[in-house]
Amino acid sequence: MTKELKKRIITSFLLFLLAVYCIFINYAIFLIAIFLVSGLAFYEISLITYRIIGYSFLLGLLCLLYVFGIFAFTAAGLYLLLGPVFFLYILSICICSDIGGYIIGKKIGGRKLTKISPNKTISGSLGSFCFSIAPFLMFYNFDKSEYSYSINNFLLCLGVSLVCQLGDIFISYLKRKAKVKDTGRILPGHGGMLDRIDGIIFAIPFAYIYHIGLTDYFEIWIEIISNAFKNL
């Protein structure tokens, strides 16, 4: 085991414990953690986009709206709608998907998945899908009614894994365009915060919309915007 891999494992373990603490301690701490993570992610993606095209107010605004208006909003909504255990469930799917891609990709290797990220392989992608089902099997023992062996829950795992992988590829594309290896240096073995949550910031909104439906999602946003204008 390389020194870099040891750092990655230790960092991942400590981050997971910290995440579990923030999820279950209370809603206020959870919100603070989400906004801190969102702030770091926004800062790092802003630096990357600046390296690619320079200063752009419109692009910066779009990044701000996505990270805080969509990711942070849906994270808070998912927590309130389905509770801290379900939020941990979705987070666990993302983590297991990432672990599966890393382990199987390293062990088997083979044909590259895309030119955007040379380290991504087809075998690694399949490993991500397979490992994403692990939380489904584990949480079934916790609550057999909520996490039953249903097609809907099975598809949720695969969908979250797919979105995680696409998010990873998208951020890899931005890093390649910016000619940087990592989005930052805050996390030993991982790089920046965005390197760690590149799939999660897309998977959380997907899981939220998957449960409430796209129509209801837009209705919620319309109501929020309407109320905001009424209070001006």
Image: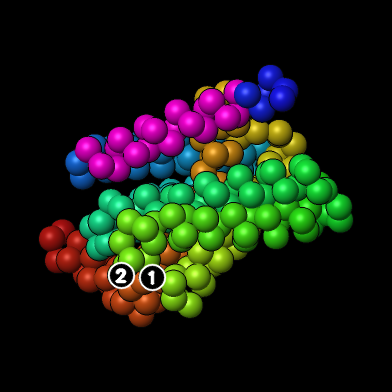
What residue would you read off at disc 1? 148
Q: Are marks 2 and 1 in contact (CB under 8 Å)?
A: yes
**Which image quadrant is residue 178 in?**
top right
Taking the magenta stretch, the answer to whether it contains residue 57 is no
Marks 2 and 1, how far apart at CA: 5 Å
Read off the magenta span: 7-25
Tell me residue 32's x, y (percent). 28, 37
Tell me residue 152's x, y (percent). 45, 76
Q: Is residue 87 visible?
A: yes
Judge left or right: residue 192 versus residue 224: right
Q: Residue at x 64, y 55 (%)?
A: 128
* Other residues around mark 2 within 10 Å, as few (<14) / some (14–19) / many (≥20): few
Please identify the residue farthest to the top as the structure is shown. Answer: 3
Quarter occupied by the C terminus: bottom left
Q: Nearer the viewer, residue 141 or 229?
A: 141
Please identify the residue farthest to the left as the structure is shown. Answer: 231
Q: Residue at x 52, y 47 (%)?
A: 95
**Color encoding of the figure:** rainbow
What residue would you read off at disc 2? 145
Please identify the residue farthest to the bottom as the structure is shown. Answer: 215
The type of residue carrying mark 1 is Ser
